[in-house]
Amino acid sequence: ALKFMEGELEQCKQETCWHTYLRGLQNAAQPSSIKSMLYAIRKGSKKAVLTALRALKQIGNEHLNDEVYDMVEKVYGEVDKRHDSTARALAAELIFLSSSIGRIERVLQRLPFHDAPELSTFITSKLFELLDHKNQVRLFAGKVLNNTTVGNYYNLAHGGSSAAFTKYLTKSDDLNSTYGINMELIPGGLLKESSVDVSLETPQESLNLLSVGLFAGGLGNVAGGDDGGNDASQEEEEATAGMRLMLMGAELRPYVFFVGTSELMGHVWSGTGSEPTPALQGNLLMMDHFQYVALLNGLVVELKLQGAISLDLTGSIQISLWNRNSHSVVKTSGAALVQASAALNSEAASSNIQVNVAGDTHLEFITDLEFYEKPYKMCIQMTQPGLVLRHNVRKHEGVTGRKHLVRTLKKRSQTIAGKSYALHRKNCEYCSIMLAEV
């Protein structure tokens, strides 16, 4: 299958062809496909280059050599051709994850010379996020920042509002759950690309449970006026918006909201996106274990363990051209059930115990945008309502030939209060202004 996709990739001429096979290779994440990624970076379109860089990140920096990093550095510096700003930011992230002090220095030294301060702000924010959570980045990039000729105010302080950070949903000694926000804006304050990543982490491993990304392009003229300092390629881009989904490390087919101004205006006037629209629904079997355990007294215990998660991802957006604002909601609902049992059966007696733990909740990602004047104001809120966790224990005991039968049921429930998650400082300032006007 890999050979087939790699061969078909080299024959691609259209945009959809590039993305189809690059996403397949990205989900496979095999080091043998690196040459195909480099080919896509050299020959592909701007969006194909971005997909190829995402595939390289999925493969892992431990498999990337100097040839790959040379190509990635060319993308960041736009040596051979112009690239999408998101691709340049991703190229900088790959370099930060490398162990090359020289490459990291060159990335930071170029930050003040970017045309758009939002790109420099986003890359700097991504660097500090990696410093907080990646030991390797802390080791090598930390040395670069200790050099005052590189790690200074001129290189690291920029006037944009883009942000990247990771914070904790829950923390424990054995398992942490984190949420990461990446928000890249274009000059003027319009959203270009954002993502919310929910991950599970142990001291040894990390699993990306769910990633929801929103992307948009060519909306500067729709919002009113140019983007102020944006490059020509961005201004000529066709109006488009959509959603990227990644589940358990595998990227799904993107959900495209609209392509072209006419399709956008059709949605605005008809209100087709104002009602919650499902983008992903499914049930996942997370645990399925069956085992017999022989005891020293000769009896055999039957153990069963099953766990399932149900996901429902919906989105809605409301746009008012009269008030020049928009309101969008991405709602991720989830329910989990874990069922365990232990049973002992013999000719003389039987005994079993069943334990059920269940709960359901949802996470809302709300974005409000006002574009009636520049700079545009955007407020992002991430909230989670209260959670009721139910825990039931059933016991059964019986003795053959005797009137001995015991059945017990214990029910417990625990209420976990709802919460609103903190985002970056600039977002809090805009939310204070916008919500005060409501």
Image (cartoon, rainbow, N blue to C red):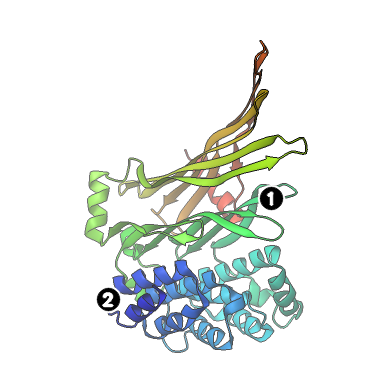
360 over 148 or under it: above or below: above
| Pick the front one: 53 or 162 | 53
Callout 1: SS: loop
Q: Residue furthest top?
A: 403
The residue carrying pointer 1 sits among few (fewer than 14), some (14 to 19) or many (20 or more) residues within 10 Å by Cα, namely some
Q: Position of residue 129 (x, y in %)?
A: 64, 64
Residue carrying label 2: 14
Which residue is pictured at 22% across the width and 51% down the height? 266
Q: Is residue 53 left or right of residue 133?
A: left
Above or below for 239 versus 140: above
**Which one is earlier in the sequence, the residue at label 1 or at label 2?**
2
Name the quadrant of the N terminus: bottom left
Mark 2, Cα crowd under 10 Å, few <14 / some 14-19 / many 20+, is few
Q: Amino acid at mark 2?
A: Gln
Looking at the image, residue 371 lies above or below residue 435: below
The quarter of the picture where residue 420 lies is: top right
For mark 1, what is the residue?
Answer: 175
- 350 left or right, relative to 227: right
Q: How many marks?
A: 2
Q: Residue at x 74, y 74 (%)?
A: 139
Q: Position of residue 359 (x, y in %)?
A: 56, 34
Residue 68 numbered mark, or none: none
Given residues 382 and 253, the one toward you in this image is 253
Instruction: Measure how far apart labels 1 and 2 are at the Cα level.
Output: 44 Å
Viewer can see residue 386: no
* Residue 418 horizontal/vertical position (percent): 60, 35
Amino acid carrying mark 1 in the image: Leu
Left or right: 331 as drawn, with respect to 139: left
In this view, the mark in front (1 or 2): 1
**SS state under label 2:** loop
Question: Which is more toward the observer, 180 or 228?
Answer: 180
